[in-house]
Image (cartoon, coloured by chain):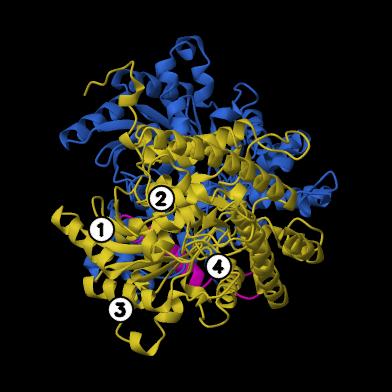
Amino acid sequence: MDFISNNNGHLLSKMATNDGHGEKSPYFDGWKAYDSDPYHSTKNPNGIIQMGLAENELSFDLVQEWVVNNPNASICTAEGANEFKEIAIFQDYHGLPEFRKGVANFMGKVRGDRARFDPDRIVMSGGATGAHEMLTFCLADPGDAFLVPTPYYPGFDRDLRWRTGVQIVPVVCESSNNFKITKEALESAFQGAKESNIRIKGLLITNPSNPLGTVLDRDTLKTLVTFINQKNIHLICDEIYAATVFNQPDFISIAEIIEEEDQRNCNRDLIHIVYSLSKDMGFPGFRIGIVYSYNDAVTNCARKMSSFGLVSTQTQHLIGSLLSDDVFVEKFLVESAERLAKRHEKFTKGLAQVGIGSLKSNAGLFIWMDLRRLLKEPTVDAETVLWKIIIHEVKLNISPGSSFHCSEPGWFRVCFANMDDEAVKIALRRIWNFVLQSSKGVEEHAKRKCRNLQLSLSFRRRDDIVMAPHMMSPHSPIPSPLVRAT
Amino acid sequence: MINLLSRKATCNSHGQDSSYFLGWQEYEKNPYDEIKNPNGIIQMGLAENQLSFDLLESWLENNPDVAGFKRNGQSIFRELALFQDYHGLPDFKKALAEFMSQIRDNKVSFNPAKLVLAAGATSANEILMFCLAEPGDAFLLPTPYYPGFDRDLKWRTEVDIVPIHCHSKNNFRITESALEEAYQSAQKQNLRVKGVLVTNPSNPLGTTLTRNEINLLLTFITTKQIHLISDEIYSGTVFSSPDFVSVMEILTEKKYSMNTEVCNRVHIVYSLSKDLGLPGFRVGAIYSNDDVVVAAATKMSSFGLVSSQTQYLLSEMLSDKKFCKYYLSQNQKRLQQQQKMLISGLQAAEISCLKSNAGLFCWVDMSHLLGSKTFDAEIDLWKKIVYDVGLNISPGSSCHCSEPGWFRVCFANMSAATLNIAIQRLKSFVQSTTAVTRNNLTTHQSVKNSRRRSSLTKWVFRLSFDGREPDER
């Protein structure tokens, strides 16, 4: 066979040269902008503040303290070195028993001991990224599809689809009911796929949700379980934010639901959980991903596939010790939730002061901010224009809703747990300044339009303008059901 | 139920039904221990380097900062815990690139920017397949080859392997005609060949490729306009002459240095599992001159990054050049010593092996002990050696060897004392087999009439299993 010799593109696979990696998404453009001008309190105080990164940096001191006090958890210290060889040669893809035990124990504690996890079902993966791809390889063939409620984490486009050849069919959720997943939306998506001859193999939910920061209520979870059982498709529950729940209502894991009386008929072979320590503990660098499946065949297959992304035994050893320390775990979970709650409150209150609302949330490392009224028009293009202004002029890297496949323009995910208090203050100040200026601008624009007798703004919109923040007292109620009251 | 899972989940392409892995399971059930289980099975199927841990341990003792996630006394725990950039820790990539150069006597220099980290060579090889081939394409591999390639190169990628048959009559060297024959064979099967993958030094042969072989390969891939992957994970285990010659070294020569096209089609896979004996840490790497491959592989590494904790430890260790030099030379000496011990022990049992200068194993010729020159007879012999003699060695058929009777026997994962015991057991086995042969009219009957026959029938040969299947080379 002949190949065009001077075009290496033909020598490489389609996968290597297409955009399936998803990095052309605006999600990453903001990162790149940030990388070229990163904020630093002293070296670059006017740089871009990173609010596009869902990382939990609030509780490292607790872990650090534990590491210092537990030198034998490290195979490099004098106290732990006697285990160095054993750990360094251990490459069994079942993983170190202490590691699996520690993780299973932690997962149970995170769920308030309302669910118990079997260490023998714990399968490792290269982060949740690796876990999702691995599960997809196990459950679906190229061309098959998963249903995913919108808005969803942009990385799923890569993790579920790139190398697997599997598709995503969105289940559209809307702000009118706080983005709840409805039976109608599920059915509609399922039927639509069927009509296009796309075989649905499963439904993937993220609970707590990224980017919404909300938890699924019991009714919704039961609706989902009923739905997947009826259609005989898999249910993958990404619970990587489980320990970031900082307010009521409580987190309800799928592990709890399937144990309940009325779920006896649930086919457990369809239930799988993806977990990770990247968000709950703040350890994205350690690449600890977990697949927990109630299906034996999937567990076995996933375990073999985990060869492609095992967790370093050095890390397994450290984590196994850390998570088996119940005193530490309990202290950490309480403290971490408190700090997240404080930070969340500070941020949402700060936003409310300039009339910026967000979806009422009780979990996650971010808020789902509502900037619809700042859009020139309710379109994705207008959202993109606004977003670019926010990055380059306001100097905040936040993530536009369109990158999360949100069906309504104007929503943005804003992360708050990856910075210190000082940076939060600065970020809020920049937002205040921007909103005040835009409102002025919008008011001017409205006046001009009035003069031209082309009042295309809705009455409600006009109200917002008339009630521009600089005219409102900080404690006025904001006219939207989605916005948190101050 | 079967319909609920993917084809990949329900097929056998994970390759774990191979005898290679079965011997493992038998070992796990009855592992040798000097004191607790002196009659147990000795593990000689595991290509691991356990001879030089004391050197690593003493380095750790002398570098206490690394232990507590500290750099210059300052804690960097937070920094490391958060570091998930798939470009890898810069210090680590730099140190790794320099270590790779050091192994090649600095005849080649590696640019850290062209190095991509992955979770072990297992992941690195799979990533390269995803980057270079479509489902249904094929790569040519010289036989015998590492059994894990059947999983790593084929399973999730749906790429095929077409063997380049190598034979004992010329010491399993790769020939031009073998390459051409393999290519034609692929064409006949309507498989589009995307490249050749070689392991240098070779697993299971333990030999390094000659300059002639490398030049043959480069000429071949130039003509066919395909890729060459050189898996060089054993490069630091070369303990005697001839010197190791990396394909990268040949590419610096005049003939190829200006030929960007060819240079861009040569990729190296590396790992610290064999050279440093750290398989648990999952440190693999891809080195490519092709920017598009580097970019795509980097993104794909998201599915299996190296733990930042481990990157940090190793960046400190590998930056200590003095230590690396000492380690490499000491380690090679110890490997050579152990290899010599095995070879002379085998010789005393009238067993020969392929002359080798690298690796953690010997490629042993036991064809004269076969009941017949067939693979069935090879498996019969293998079973005897596992169950009767108590040695888990790897049968050549699991490595896709085209001639029956060859076995890979590892020597670097045990003490000299244990190696001695293994050799004694083999010697006794051979002596008693030979004695029985002499007492019978035909060689063919010796196996049947052997007292071992009754013990053989005790074991049921299970083809698939669900036990502890370690992941190894």
Q: Secondary structure at mark 4?
A: loop
Residue bearing the label numbered 2: A159
User: Of circles 4 and 1, which is in front?
Assistant: 4
Q: Please tell me which residue lies in front, B235 or B416.
A: B235
Q: Residue at x 67, y 59 (%)?
A: A346
Q: Amino acid at mark 1?
A: Arg
> Label 4, label 1: how many angstroms apart (C-alpha)?
40 Å
Q: Amino acid at mark 2?
A: Asp
**Residues at discs 1 and 2 in contact (Cβ within 8 Å):** no
- Please report whichever mark, 2 or 4, sits nearer to the chain's N-terminal start: 2
- Please report whichever mark, 4 or 3, sits nearer to the chain's N-terminal start: 3
User: Of circles 4 and 3, which is in front?
Assistant: 4
**Which chain is represented by blue in the image?**
B
**Which chain is represented by yellow in the image?**
A
Q: Secondary structure at mark 2?
A: helix
Across and down, in percent, residue B113 comes to 57, 29
Residue bearing the label numbered 1: B7
**Viewed as shown, does residue B108 lie left or right of B176?**
right
Within the magenta stretch, is there residue A267?
no
Q: Amino acid at mark 3?
A: Asn
What segment is highlighted magenta in the picture?
B10-39
**Viewed as shown, does residue B464 lie left or right of B66?**
left
Residue bearing the label numbered 3: A267
Within the magenta stretch, is there residue B15?
yes
**Residue A232 against residue B168 in the figure, above or below:** below
Badges 2 and 4, same chain: yes
Quarter-of-image position of residue B221: top left
Q: Residues within 10 Å of mark 1 (few under 14, many from 20)?
A: some
> Label 2, label 4: how many angstroms apart (C-alpha)?
26 Å
User: Of circles 3 and 1, which is in front?
Assistant: 3
Tell me the number on the disc at residue A362.
4
